[in-house]
Image (cartoon, rainbow, N blue to C red):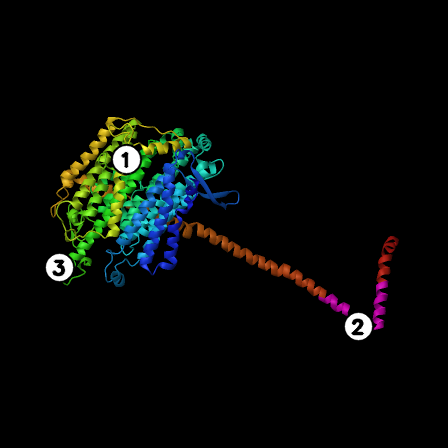
Amino acid sequence: MEGFLNIAWLVPVPPFLAFVAILLFLNPNKTVSALTAIIGAVLSLIIAWPIAFTAFTTEHFGEHPVYGELFHIPTGVTSFMVGFQVDPANALMLFMSSFLLVMIFIYASGYMTFPAHLAPEMYPVSYQQGRDPRYSRFMAYISLFATGMLGLIVSNSLLTFFIFWEIMGLCSYLLIGFWYEKPAARSANIKAFMTTRVGDTIMLVGMILLYIKSEPSSLQFNEILQIGNLQSLAEQMVTIPLLDITVPWLALIAVLIFFGTVGKSAQFPLHVWLPDAMEGPTPVSAMIHAATMVSAGVFLVVRLFPLFAAAGEAAPGVLRFVAFTGAFTAIFAATIAVAQWDIKRVLAYSTISQLGFMVAALGIGAYGPALFHLITHAFFKALLFLGSGSVIHGVEHGFHHAHAHDAHGHDEHAAHAPVALLNRRDGVLDVNDPQDMRNMGGLLGRMPITAWTFIIGGLSLSGFPFITAGFWSKDEILASAWFGQNTWVFWTLAVAAFLTAFYTARQISLTFLGRPRSEGAAHAPESVASMTWPLILISPFAIALGWAGIPEHFPVIGGIIPNWLEHYLEPYVTYQGFHVAHPEFNMMPLLVSLGVALGGLLIGFVVYGRGLREGQVDPLRNVMGPLWMVFHRKYYVDELYNATIIPFTLGLSKFLYLFDDKWVIDPIVDGIGSLAVWFSKLMATIDRVVVDGTVNGTGWLADRMGRMLRQTQDGHVQVYLMVAVVTVTVWLLLKAMPILLTLV
């Protein structure tokens, strides 16, 4: 067992070596760059899966997690130990992330061969080669992104966790704005970077306080999560001046660290960056939403759950705050998703909502269900995002095909001509936009592999009963909320689940059913094998993965397949010393789960199953009226931020600049500088007049005395005799002086 587990630190190394190799040596050769990136991901998979399956198959592995030491970073007083850790939670993450990264890398090698965002005349050579002009750079970036994800998973301390966390933040900035020719992409990457930095800064403050207050000072998970340390932090109190309340240090630290989750996992109010992140290439969207980017925020709470559980006991408001944030975000994002037209933005708000499910689950103490949903969601959301990219690819190809073979036969690049915009009551329609679902329809016949795999992912997201992974993980969260008498969490998540099923049915209907509503959809081809095979390989996980967590007391099928996940996690929960409730089977949450899933899907297919007629307004718009536009405009949160926070921030920065440059800081610095110049001039004068004068006077006196004494050394005997007589005379006078003074 130890053999495989002790090489866990190697998991992030191959992608990093691929990143360095592409960056320094392989950039000119796009094919070799892609192969190098894929090989790096495959090698990580080859290392990660034996580790994961060793953990899965070792009885009571959770009682003996592996902690490995690599080296120490000296800090003067102490040192930080850098190492790795393997436990049941991150073994699941290794299993999920390493596989999905390989699928995404293979998919990306095909996706990035068609630079649909660029006009052909901008990069004619790249178009001839059929690849994005920065194809190799893209492969280098996603390799570094994978390094951050895998390194975060195996980290043994909050310090290295945070370092890899920030590497992912850097890569998301670089990849969201990868097509920086588009103004929207440039704005989106800055928005993502700045918004997540807010959460990260608050999290860093919590980390610093945790390091200072822990005994001994440490950020290693196995030390800071010791029961004794948590009890000590819970007993120490701190008064928060602005709120004038006294809370345990543990509660304050937990809330501060949780803001890292709020930023990274796009929870309200720091959710605004994630939908705009769709401006990056679709493989990036899949990595952000499915692998270990936004889910890293949830995994942070999973990793530190003993700390949050202890904080909840010391100050119950901590977990209530976590649960409220997650539940509110879940329903908030779900309502927005029902009124979006961009196929990837629907999925983006879906991710925000599903992450809210996980955060709410952790807030009510449902550790296992939250981790369960994190893993299942990764697979079906990867399937959906990669499927949406395939759809966009196909529709874009369809537009190119249609314009290249139009009735005139000579306008080969008409797809890049100025687009026609149609004003609609439910939003402006760009008739050449391959991401707008109003330009789709009928793709089930044109792109069958993409369509059926997307439908599988959509049904799993909706929680289609019994046969999809999403049903079992979502049902466990609802059952835990009901069992724990968290009624408001239960019903909030139930409504969010209904909306999830509804907007998923809407998305499937508008995209794949009905008749094509544009030339792009009418001529869309199926994607290349490098894009469809990953979809096929991910699909079984979106179905069967949930069977590993079927409750033993579930009617009829419970116990037929053992509840492997619960038995797998139980020893680790016991080892970490926190309590997790095991909900008894209750028919009520099951009926609600079935009702919201099937009801949402049924209503969605009834309303949208036939697609839209040309020029038809969204039927939901006619029913909801102005409220639909509120959902469509995302509750005007961006407009609110643009009218308040951003002007305030810019005004504050301008004020601080003036404060520094004009009013206070610079005048003080300039005054000190002027005083220093005046004082130096005074010192120069003293040096010249006093010091130099004394030295020069002493030298002049010595010179004069020397000249006088030189006259007594001219070589004449009589001069020497005179000097001797004078000397003797003076000596006699000095000797006789006391006697003479006595006589006088």
Q: Is there CB contact under 8 Å for labels 1 and 3? A: no
Residues packed near mark 3 inside 10 Å, few (<14), some (14 to 19) or many (20 plus)? few
Question: Looking at the image, is 35 positioned above or below residue 626?
Answer: below
The residue segment tinted magenta is 703-728
Write down the residue under mark 1. 547
Name the disc covering residue 274, or none: none
**Residue flagged by tag 1: what amino acid is it?**
Trp
Q: Which residue is mark 3?
A: 406
- The amino acid marked with disc number 3 is Asp
Quadrant of the rendering where the C terminus is positioned: bottom right
Residue 708 located within the stretch drawn in magenta = yes
**Residue 89 image point, x, y percent:** 37, 37
Rendering quarter of residue 152:
top left
x%, y% of residue 459? 22, 39
Q: Is residue 736 left or right of residue 269?
A: right
Circle nearer the viewer, 2 or 1: 1
